[in-house]
Image: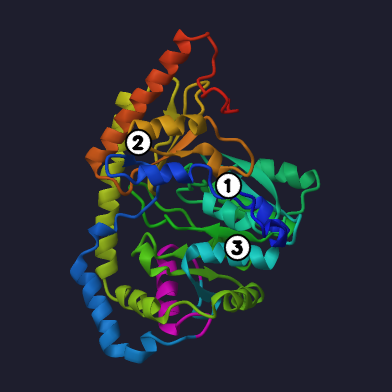
Protein backbone atom coordinates (compact mmCIF):
# COMPACT_ATOMS: atom_id res chain seq x y z
CA UNK A 1 0.00 0.00 0.00
CA UNK A 2 1.48 3.34 -1.09
CA UNK A 3 1.81 5.90 1.71
CA UNK A 4 -0.28 9.04 1.27
CA UNK A 5 2.18 11.92 0.69
CA UNK A 6 -0.31 14.37 2.24
CA UNK A 7 -1.06 12.32 5.34
CA UNK A 8 0.46 14.92 7.68
CA UNK A 9 -1.82 17.63 6.26
CA UNK A 10 -5.07 16.01 7.28
CA UNK A 11 -6.87 16.99 10.49
CA UNK A 12 -6.24 14.67 13.43
CA UNK A 13 -9.94 13.84 13.61
CA UNK A 14 -9.62 11.95 10.32
CA UNK A 15 -7.68 9.28 12.20
CA UNK A 16 -10.92 8.27 13.89
CA UNK A 17 -12.85 8.09 10.63
CA UNK A 18 -12.50 5.09 8.38
CA UNK A 19 -14.44 3.37 5.68
CA UNK A 20 -16.32 0.28 6.73
CA UNK A 21 -14.10 -2.77 6.46
CA UNK A 22 -16.97 -4.55 4.74
CA UNK A 23 -17.50 -1.88 2.05
CA UNK A 24 -15.50 -3.84 -0.53
CA UNK A 25 -17.61 -6.90 0.19
CA UNK A 26 -20.77 -4.87 -0.35
CA UNK A 27 -19.46 -3.95 -3.81
CA UNK A 28 -19.35 -7.68 -4.51
CA UNK A 29 -22.79 -8.03 -2.95
CA UNK A 30 -24.20 -5.69 -5.61
CA UNK A 31 -23.78 -8.45 -8.18
CA UNK A 32 -27.20 -9.57 -9.43
CA UNK A 33 -26.70 -13.16 -8.26
CA UNK A 34 -26.15 -12.03 -4.64
CA UNK A 35 -29.21 -11.58 -2.45
CA UNK A 36 -28.46 -8.49 -0.41
CA UNK A 37 -30.08 -8.47 3.01
CA UNK A 38 -27.65 -5.69 3.97
CA UNK A 39 -28.80 -2.25 2.88
CA UNK A 40 -31.89 -0.47 4.17
CA UNK A 41 -33.10 0.80 0.80
CA UNK A 42 -36.79 1.68 0.59
CA UNK A 43 -38.68 -0.11 -2.16
CA UNK A 44 -39.23 3.01 -4.24
CA UNK A 45 -40.26 0.87 -7.19
CA UNK A 46 -43.67 0.68 -5.48
CA UNK A 47 -44.23 4.42 -5.93
CA UNK A 48 -46.69 5.01 -8.77
CA UNK A 49 -44.57 6.56 -11.50
CA UNK A 50 -47.41 8.77 -12.67
CA UNK A 51 -47.73 10.28 -9.18
CA UNK A 52 -44.07 11.28 -9.24
CA UNK A 53 -44.28 12.62 -12.80
CA UNK A 54 -47.38 14.66 -11.95
CA UNK A 55 -45.70 16.20 -8.91
CA UNK A 56 -42.48 17.09 -10.72
CA UNK A 57 -44.32 18.47 -13.75
CA UNK A 58 -46.56 20.60 -11.53
CA UNK A 59 -43.54 22.06 -9.72
CA UNK A 60 -41.75 22.92 -12.97
CA UNK A 61 -44.90 24.35 -14.55
CA UNK A 62 -45.96 26.49 -11.59
CA UNK A 63 -42.70 27.41 -9.88
CA UNK A 64 -40.30 27.65 -12.80
CA UNK A 65 -37.24 29.67 -11.89
CA UNK A 66 -37.90 29.60 -8.15
CA UNK A 67 -37.47 25.82 -8.18
CA UNK A 68 -34.01 26.25 -9.66
CA UNK A 69 -32.89 29.13 -7.43
CA UNK A 70 -31.31 29.40 -3.97
CA UNK A 71 -33.69 29.65 -1.04
CA UNK A 72 -33.49 30.39 2.68
CA UNK A 73 -31.44 28.14 4.93
CA UNK A 74 -34.40 27.19 7.13
CA UNK A 75 -36.22 25.73 4.13
CA UNK A 76 -39.31 26.78 2.21
CA UNK A 77 -42.22 27.89 4.39
CA UNK A 78 -44.71 25.73 2.51
CA UNK A 79 -42.72 22.57 3.11
CA UNK A 80 -42.20 23.43 6.77
CA UNK A 81 -45.97 23.71 7.14
CA UNK A 82 -46.36 20.27 5.54
CA UNK A 83 -43.73 18.86 7.89
CA UNK A 84 -45.62 20.25 10.89
CA UNK A 85 -48.78 18.48 9.65
CA UNK A 86 -46.78 15.27 9.24
CA UNK A 87 -45.39 15.60 12.76
CA UNK A 88 -48.92 16.05 14.07
CA UNK A 89 -49.70 12.59 12.67
CA UNK A 90 -47.05 11.24 15.04
CA UNK A 91 -48.03 13.41 17.99
CA UNK A 92 -44.93 15.60 17.79
CA UNK A 93 -45.83 19.22 18.61
CA UNK A 94 -44.16 21.80 16.37
CA UNK A 95 -44.64 25.10 14.62
CA UNK A 96 -43.18 25.94 11.18
CA UNK A 97 -40.78 28.31 12.94
CA UNK A 98 -39.43 25.33 14.93
CA UNK A 99 -38.29 23.52 11.77
CA UNK A 100 -35.09 23.60 9.72
CA UNK A 101 -35.05 21.53 6.52
CA UNK A 102 -31.94 19.41 6.00
CA UNK A 103 -30.49 17.17 3.31
CA UNK A 104 -31.96 14.05 4.81
CA UNK A 105 -31.91 13.30 8.51
CA UNK A 106 -28.26 12.32 8.08
CA UNK A 107 -27.31 15.97 7.68
CA UNK A 108 -29.35 16.80 10.76
CA UNK A 109 -27.26 14.29 12.72
CA UNK A 110 -24.06 15.95 11.53
CA UNK A 111 -25.37 19.42 12.41
CA UNK A 112 -26.38 18.31 15.90
CA UNK A 113 -22.91 16.87 16.44
CA UNK A 114 -21.28 20.01 15.07
CA UNK A 115 -23.07 22.40 17.43
CA UNK A 116 -22.74 20.27 20.58
CA UNK A 117 -19.57 18.16 20.53
CA UNK A 118 -16.09 19.34 21.42
CA UNK A 119 -13.25 16.84 21.31
CA UNK A 120 -13.49 14.52 24.30
CA UNK A 121 -17.07 15.37 25.21
CA UNK A 122 -19.29 12.54 26.34
CA UNK A 123 -22.45 11.64 24.44
CA UNK A 124 -24.96 8.85 25.10
CA UNK A 125 -25.98 6.40 22.38
CA UNK A 126 -27.90 3.15 22.37
CA UNK A 127 -26.02 -0.13 22.12
CA UNK A 128 -26.52 -1.12 19.35
CA UNK A 129 -27.01 2.23 17.57
CA UNK A 130 -27.65 3.40 14.02
CA UNK A 131 -24.35 3.19 12.14
CA UNK A 132 -24.94 6.49 10.30
CA UNK A 133 -25.29 8.33 13.60
CA UNK A 134 -22.11 6.78 14.95
CA UNK A 135 -20.28 7.85 11.78
CA UNK A 136 -21.59 11.40 12.03
CA UNK A 137 -20.63 11.67 15.69
CA UNK A 138 -17.20 10.05 15.31
CA UNK A 139 -16.07 12.97 13.17
CA UNK A 140 -16.23 15.27 16.21
CA UNK A 141 -14.19 12.94 18.48
CA UNK A 142 -16.57 12.35 21.39
CA UNK A 143 -16.37 9.71 24.09
CA UNK A 144 -19.31 7.36 23.72
CA UNK A 145 -21.40 6.20 26.65
CA UNK A 146 -23.19 3.14 25.30
CA UNK A 147 -26.43 2.22 27.07
CA UNK A 148 -27.81 -1.26 26.30
CA UNK A 149 -31.20 -2.03 24.84
CA UNK A 150 -33.63 -4.72 25.90
CA UNK A 151 -37.12 -5.57 24.67
CA UNK A 152 -38.42 -2.30 26.15
CA UNK A 153 -35.78 -0.11 24.54
CA UNK A 154 -32.95 1.78 26.21
CA UNK A 155 -32.29 0.55 29.76
CA UNK A 156 -32.70 3.91 31.50
CA UNK A 157 -31.58 2.47 34.84
CA UNK A 158 -28.15 1.97 33.23
CA UNK A 159 -28.15 5.60 32.15
CA UNK A 160 -28.91 6.66 35.71
CA UNK A 161 -26.02 4.55 36.97
CA UNK A 162 -23.69 6.21 34.47
CA UNK A 163 -24.82 9.66 35.58
CA UNK A 164 -24.43 8.71 39.24
CA UNK A 165 -20.87 7.61 38.43
CA UNK A 166 -20.06 11.07 37.09
CA UNK A 167 -20.96 10.96 33.38
CA UNK A 168 -21.84 14.41 31.97
CA UNK A 169 -23.00 13.87 28.39
CA UNK A 170 -23.68 16.74 25.99
CA UNK A 171 -26.74 14.93 24.59
CA UNK A 172 -28.45 11.56 24.35
CA UNK A 173 -29.27 10.03 20.96
CA UNK A 174 -32.04 7.47 20.52
CA UNK A 175 -34.29 5.87 17.89
CA UNK A 176 -37.14 4.98 20.26
CA UNK A 177 -39.51 3.51 17.67
CA UNK A 178 -38.39 0.49 15.60
CA UNK A 179 -34.74 1.18 16.35
CA UNK A 180 -32.02 0.48 13.82
CA UNK A 181 -30.67 -2.20 14.01
CA UNK A 182 -32.40 -3.85 16.98
CA UNK A 183 -35.94 -2.92 15.84
CA UNK A 184 -37.21 -2.59 19.41
CA UNK A 185 -39.64 0.10 20.54
CA UNK A 186 -39.16 1.92 23.81
CA UNK A 187 -42.04 1.28 26.19
CA UNK A 188 -44.19 4.12 27.48
CA UNK A 189 -42.82 3.67 31.00
CA UNK A 190 -39.25 3.91 29.69
CA UNK A 191 -40.10 6.97 27.60
CA UNK A 192 -41.44 8.76 30.64
CA UNK A 193 -38.46 7.67 32.73
CA UNK A 194 -36.00 8.83 30.07
CA UNK A 195 -37.45 12.33 29.66
CA UNK A 196 -37.60 12.70 33.45
CA UNK A 197 -33.98 11.63 33.95
CA UNK A 198 -32.65 13.75 31.10
CA UNK A 199 -34.73 16.75 32.14
CA UNK A 200 -33.40 16.60 35.70
CA UNK A 201 -29.82 16.22 34.45
CA UNK A 202 -30.24 18.89 31.72
CA UNK A 203 -29.29 16.47 28.96
CA UNK A 204 -30.88 17.26 25.59
CA UNK A 205 -32.48 14.25 23.89
CA UNK A 206 -32.00 13.77 20.15
CA UNK A 207 -35.00 11.73 19.00
CA UNK A 208 -34.54 10.20 15.54
CA UNK A 209 -37.78 8.83 14.06
CA UNK A 210 -37.33 7.55 10.50
CA UNK A 211 -39.52 4.45 10.86
CA UNK A 212 -42.43 5.56 13.04
CA UNK A 213 -44.97 5.49 10.21
CA UNK A 214 -43.91 2.03 9.03
CA UNK A 215 -46.00 0.17 11.60
CA UNK A 216 -47.27 -3.33 10.77
CA UNK A 217 -49.29 -3.91 13.93
CA UNK A 218 -49.91 -2.48 17.38
CA UNK A 219 -50.70 1.04 18.52
CA UNK A 220 -48.24 3.96 18.33
CA UNK A 221 -46.71 5.35 21.48
CA UNK A 222 -46.24 9.07 22.16
CA UNK A 223 -43.00 10.43 20.77
CA UNK A 224 -40.46 11.78 23.21
CA UNK A 225 -40.95 15.33 21.94
CA UNK A 226 -44.61 15.18 22.95
CA UNK A 227 -43.50 14.28 26.50
CA UNK A 228 -40.79 16.96 26.78
CA UNK A 229 -41.06 19.50 23.93
CA UNK A 230 -38.43 21.88 25.28
CA UNK A 231 -35.75 19.22 25.81
CA UNK A 232 -36.12 17.06 22.69
CA UNK A 233 -34.51 17.74 19.32
CA UNK A 234 -36.66 15.78 16.89
CA UNK A 235 -35.23 14.48 13.60
CA UNK A 236 -37.33 13.22 10.73
CA UNK A 237 -37.08 12.29 7.07
CA UNK A 238 -39.11 11.69 3.93
CA UNK A 239 -36.81 8.87 2.86
CA UNK A 240 -39.24 6.22 4.11
CA UNK A 241 -42.52 8.14 3.66
CA UNK A 242 -41.69 9.28 0.10
CA UNK A 243 -38.25 8.57 -1.34
CA UNK A 244 -34.60 8.92 -0.25
CA UNK A 245 -33.66 10.49 -3.58
CA UNK A 246 -35.35 13.77 -2.68
CA UNK A 247 -32.97 14.11 0.31
CA UNK A 248 -35.46 15.86 2.55
CA UNK A 249 -35.08 15.68 6.32
CA UNK A 250 -35.67 18.08 9.17
CA UNK A 251 -34.98 18.98 12.74
CA UNK A 252 -37.57 20.40 15.13
CA UNK A 253 -36.05 22.18 18.10
CA UNK A 254 -36.35 25.10 20.48
CA UNK A 255 -35.13 28.52 19.26
CA UNK A 256 -31.71 28.49 20.96
CA UNK A 257 -30.86 25.13 19.39
CA UNK A 258 -32.54 25.88 16.07
CA UNK A 259 -30.62 29.11 15.54
CA UNK A 260 -27.33 27.27 15.92
CA UNK A 261 -28.45 24.43 13.67
CA UNK A 262 -29.29 27.04 11.05
CA UNK A 263 -25.85 28.66 11.33
CA UNK A 264 -24.20 25.26 10.92
CA UNK A 265 -26.52 24.37 8.03
CA UNK A 266 -25.80 27.58 6.14
CA UNK A 267 -22.07 27.11 6.64
CA UNK A 268 -22.32 23.58 5.25
CA UNK A 269 -24.44 24.09 2.12
CA UNK A 270 -26.25 27.48 2.24
CA UNK A 271 -29.62 25.79 1.73
CA UNK A 272 -31.31 22.59 0.67
CA UNK A 273 -32.53 22.19 -2.91
CA UNK A 274 -35.57 24.37 -3.67
CA UNK A 275 -36.56 21.92 -6.40
CA UNK A 276 -36.77 18.86 -4.16
CA UNK A 277 -38.40 20.89 -1.38
CA UNK A 278 -41.16 21.97 -3.76
CA UNK A 279 -41.54 18.40 -5.02
CA UNK A 280 -41.86 17.18 -1.43
CA UNK A 281 -44.34 19.93 -0.54
CA UNK A 282 -46.52 19.09 -3.53
CA UNK A 283 -46.31 15.34 -2.83
CA UNK A 284 -47.57 15.84 0.74
CA UNK A 285 -50.72 17.65 -0.44
CA UNK A 286 -53.97 15.72 -0.19
CA UNK A 287 -54.15 11.96 0.45
CA UNK A 288 -51.76 10.66 -2.20
CA UNK A 289 -48.92 10.20 0.26
CA UNK A 290 -51.17 8.31 2.70
CA UNK A 291 -52.31 5.88 0.03
CA UNK A 292 -48.76 5.24 -1.12
CA UNK A 293 -47.52 4.87 2.46
CA UNK A 294 -50.21 2.27 3.13
CA UNK A 295 -48.99 0.36 0.07
CA UNK A 296 -45.40 0.55 1.35
CA UNK A 297 -46.45 -0.79 4.74
CA UNK A 298 -48.26 -3.71 3.13
CA UNK A 299 -45.22 -4.56 1.02
CA UNK A 300 -42.82 -4.40 3.95
CA UNK A 301 -45.15 -6.45 6.17
CA UNK A 302 -45.24 -9.22 3.54
CA UNK A 303 -41.45 -9.22 3.28
CA UNK A 304 -41.03 -9.22 7.05
CA UNK A 305 -43.32 -12.24 7.26
CA UNK A 306 -41.31 -13.99 4.54
CA UNK A 307 -38.10 -13.41 6.51
CA UNK A 308 -39.46 -14.48 9.88
CA UNK A 309 -41.02 -17.64 8.46
CA UNK A 310 -37.83 -18.67 6.70
CA UNK A 311 -35.65 -17.88 9.72
CA UNK A 312 -37.74 -20.34 11.72
CA UNK A 313 -37.30 -23.00 9.04
CA UNK A 314 -33.65 -22.43 8.12
CA UNK A 315 -31.60 -21.05 11.01
CA UNK A 316 -29.86 -23.60 13.25
CA UNK A 317 -30.52 -24.13 16.97
CA UNK A 318 -28.90 -21.48 19.16
CA UNK A 319 -29.87 -18.59 16.89
CA UNK A 320 -32.52 -16.07 17.91
CA UNK A 321 -33.96 -12.90 16.41
CA UNK A 322 -36.27 -9.97 17.01
CA UNK A 323 -39.91 -9.96 15.87
CA UNK A 324 -40.29 -6.44 14.44
CA UNK A 325 -43.69 -4.75 14.50
CA UNK A 326 -42.45 -2.20 11.96
CA UNK A 327 -39.37 -0.80 10.26
CA UNK A 328 -36.96 -2.47 7.87
CA UNK A 329 -34.88 -5.01 9.79
CA UNK A 330 -34.46 -8.16 11.83
CA UNK A 331 -31.65 -8.26 14.41
CA UNK A 332 -30.31 -11.78 14.85
CA UNK A 333 -28.09 -13.35 17.49
CA UNK A 334 -25.93 -16.17 16.12
CA UNK A 335 -25.20 -19.52 17.75
CA UNK A 336 -22.37 -19.51 20.27
CA UNK A 337 -18.95 -19.05 18.72
CA UNK A 338 -20.08 -17.77 15.32
CA UNK A 339 -18.40 -14.50 14.30
CA UNK A 340 -20.65 -12.53 11.95
CA UNK A 341 -17.82 -10.27 10.82
CA UNK A 342 -15.45 -13.12 9.99
CA UNK A 343 -18.21 -15.07 8.23
CA UNK A 344 -19.25 -12.27 5.86
CA UNK A 345 -16.78 -13.08 3.02
CA UNK A 346 -18.01 -16.67 3.04
CA UNK A 347 -21.60 -15.44 2.97
CA UNK A 348 -20.88 -13.36 -0.14
CA UNK A 349 -19.30 -16.47 -1.68
CA UNK A 350 -22.65 -18.18 -0.98
CA UNK A 351 -24.38 -15.24 -2.71
CA UNK A 352 -25.97 -13.58 0.31
CA UNK A 353 -24.98 -10.42 2.21
CA UNK A 354 -25.83 -8.91 5.60
CA UNK A 355 -24.38 -6.30 7.98
CA UNK A 356 -22.28 -7.65 10.89
CA UNK A 357 -23.27 -6.43 14.32
CA UNK A 358 -19.91 -4.71 14.86
CA UNK A 359 -21.06 -1.86 12.60
CA UNK A 360 -23.54 -0.75 15.25
CA UNK A 361 -21.25 -0.30 18.23
CA UNK A 362 -18.64 2.35 19.03
CA UNK A 363 -16.25 -0.42 20.10
CA UNK A 364 -15.61 -3.99 18.98
CA UNK A 365 -18.82 -5.51 20.29
CA UNK A 366 -21.49 -7.15 18.15
CA UNK A 367 -19.59 -10.02 16.56
CA UNK A 368 -22.33 -12.43 17.63
CA UNK A 369 -25.08 -10.44 15.89
CA UNK A 370 -26.06 -9.46 12.36
CA UNK A 371 -28.69 -7.23 10.81
CA UNK A 372 -30.94 -8.53 8.06
CA UNK A 373 -32.92 -6.13 5.88
CA UNK A 374 -36.19 -7.23 4.29
CA UNK A 375 -37.33 -3.92 2.79
CA UNK A 376 -35.96 -4.10 -0.76
CA UNK A 377 -35.68 -7.73 -1.98
CA UNK A 378 -38.82 -9.50 -3.17
CA UNK A 379 -40.38 -11.99 -0.75
CA UNK A 380 -38.92 -14.91 -2.69
CA UNK A 381 -35.48 -13.30 -2.71
CA UNK A 382 -35.78 -12.75 1.05
CA UNK A 383 -36.61 -16.43 1.53
CA UNK A 384 -33.76 -17.56 -0.70
CA UNK A 385 -31.25 -15.27 1.00
CA UNK A 386 -32.24 -16.51 4.46
CA UNK A 387 -32.04 -20.13 3.27
CA UNK A 388 -28.52 -19.55 1.94
CA UNK A 389 -27.46 -17.91 5.18
CA UNK A 390 -29.04 -20.66 7.27
CA UNK A 391 -27.16 -23.31 5.31
CA UNK A 392 -23.91 -21.41 5.76
CA UNK A 393 -24.45 -21.19 9.51
CA UNK A 394 -25.13 -24.92 9.71
CA UNK A 395 -21.99 -25.64 7.68
CA UNK A 396 -19.89 -23.33 9.87
CA UNK A 397 -21.07 -25.06 13.02
CA UNK A 398 -20.56 -28.50 11.48
CA UNK A 399 -17.04 -27.72 10.30
CA UNK A 400 -16.09 -26.40 13.70
CA UNK A 401 -17.46 -29.52 15.40
CA UNK A 402 -15.56 -31.76 12.99
CA UNK A 403 -12.33 -29.84 13.51
CA UNK A 404 -10.35 -29.41 16.67
CA UNK A 405 -13.36 -29.19 18.99
CA UNK A 406 -12.97 -25.44 19.48
CA UNK A 407 -16.13 -23.47 20.23
CA UNK A 408 -15.06 -20.75 17.81
CA UNK A 409 -16.08 -20.90 14.16
CA UNK A 410 -14.26 -17.68 13.21
CA UNK A 411 -11.91 -17.71 10.27
CA UNK A 412 -8.31 -18.38 11.24
CA UNK A 413 -6.49 -15.13 11.85
CA UNK A 414 -9.72 -13.08 11.94
CA UNK A 415 -9.10 -11.96 15.47
CA UNK A 416 -12.79 -12.45 16.21
CA UNK A 417 -14.58 -14.49 18.76
Residue 51: numbered disc:
none
- In this image, 379 relative to 343: left or right? left
Q: Could you say whether the residue bearing mark 3 is in a helix, strand or loop?
A: loop
- Tell me residue 106's x, y (percent): 51, 62
User: Reading the chain from its start, which is encountered first: label 2 or label 1?
Assistant: 1
Q: Is residue 19 above or below residue 78?
A: above
Which mark is nearer the camera, 3 or 2?
A: 2
Q: Could you say whether the residue bearing mark 2 is in a helix, strand or loop?
A: strand
Q: Which residues are magenta?
A: 72-93
Q: Quadrant of residue 203?
A: bottom right
Residue 17 part of the magenta-drawn span: no
Q: Is residue 188 above or below residue 294?
A: above
Residue 228: numbered disc:
3
Residue 190: numbered disc:
1
User: Reading the chain from its start, which is encountered first: label 3 or label 2?
Assistant: 3
- Tell me residue 33's x, y (percent): 27, 40
Q: Could you say whether the residue bearing mark 1 is in a helix, strand or loop?
A: helix
User: Nearest the camera: 29 or 224?
Assistant: 29
Could you tell me which residue is drawn at 43 percent across and 20 percent down?
396
Q: CA distance from mark 2 to mark 1?
A: 37 Å
The residue under label 2 is: 352
Q: CA distance from mark 1 to mark 3?
A: 13 Å
| Circle 2 residues within 10 Å: few <14, some 14–19, many ≥20 | many
Could you tell me which residue is drawn at 45 percent across and 20 percent down?
318
Could you tell me which residue is drawn at 49 percent across and 57 percent down?
222
Amino acid sequence: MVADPQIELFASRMAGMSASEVRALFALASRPEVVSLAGGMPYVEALPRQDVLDVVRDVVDHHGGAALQYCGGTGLAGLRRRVVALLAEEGAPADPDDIVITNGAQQALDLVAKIFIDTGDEIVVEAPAYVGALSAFFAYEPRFIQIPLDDDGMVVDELERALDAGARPKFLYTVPTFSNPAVVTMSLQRRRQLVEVCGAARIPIVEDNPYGMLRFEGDPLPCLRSLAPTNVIYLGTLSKVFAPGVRIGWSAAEPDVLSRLLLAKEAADLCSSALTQLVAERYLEGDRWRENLAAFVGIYRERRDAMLGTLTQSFPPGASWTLPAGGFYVWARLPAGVDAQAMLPRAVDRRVAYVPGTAFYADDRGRDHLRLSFCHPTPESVREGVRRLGQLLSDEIGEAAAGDGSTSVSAAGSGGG
